[in-house]
Image (tube, helix red, strand yellow):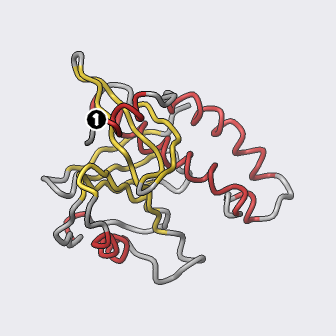
Amino acid sequence: MSRDRARAFQQLEYRDPRPFLVKLREAEPQIARSKLPKKVKNLRTNALKWSREMRAAALFCYGMAQRIGQTVYLASSEAQDYDFVASWAVDDTQHLAPVQLKEVVPQDLNPLASVQATVNALSKYVDSEDLTVVIHLNQHGRFDPAALVVPSLRIAALWIFGAISEDQAQWGLWGNFLETPEGTRFEYPT
């Protein structure tokens, strides 16, 4: 990562994703019972795209925090090839990772959407060696990480996460698929 890019990332405002997720979870039952259109309830309008992506970013960072045992902060900063920046500290060293968020949309939106197709499309990143790509698996069904075929990619890391319970109380995080991937279970924070 260039010094200029790292300096710019250090100027961002980083937040703990947990409080955001807790507040969102408190509001979800009221939203679900409302008479709002389904697209609004599911954050599927252009006006709500930022909210949908920040929820996914917060869930990923929270899941990573559960995996590594320390808070992973996030800063909203969409530019060039990334959607947000994740930050965590090990000893006295601050780590920064620009993250591109992808989504495998629900099958009612696109019955052909799949994790494999999303991973295959990542070959377009040819000069992104400090970029972490995170795929939000937003579909019901089973995911077999061992069946995923990962082509040669020029990115820093590849992670996949998604709800593993119908009520979205339980989540799974798999990766890094560019190394030896492992799975981690975590609970949505309350």
Q: Residue furthest left?
A: 180
Picture coordinates of residue 3, whole percent (x, y): 28, 35
Q: Which residue is mark 1?
A: 3
Label 1, residues with CA under 10 Å away: few <14, some 14-19, many ≥20:
few
Q: Toward which corner of the image does residue 186 lie, by quadrant?
A: top left
Q: Quadrant of the N terminus?
A: top left
Check disc 1 and give the amino acid type: Arg
Q: Quadrant of the C terminus?
A: top right
Q: Residue furthest top?
A: 92
Q: Toward which corner of the image does residue 29 lie, by quadrant?
A: top right
Q: Residue furthest front?
A: 4
Picture coordinates of residue 134, whole percent (x, y): 37, 55
Picture coordinates of residue 148, whole percent (x, y): 23, 70
Picture coordinates of residue 120, whole percent (x, y): 30, 75
Q: Residue at x 46, y 28 (%)?
A: 11
Q: Element at badge 1? A: helix
Q: Residue at x 57, y 28 (%)?
A: 19
Q: Is residue 49 left or right of residue 97?
A: right
Q: Toward which corner of the image does residue 63 lie, by quadrant?
A: top left
Q: Is 106 drawn above or below residue 30 in the view shown?
A: below
Q: Residue at x 76, y 49 (%)?
A: 31
Q: Is residue 139 left or right of residue 89?
A: right
Q: Is 47 drawn above or below residue 54 in the view shown?
A: below
Q: Residue furthest right?
A: 35
Q: Residue at x 57, y 36 (%)?
A: 21
79 or 38: nearer the eye?
79
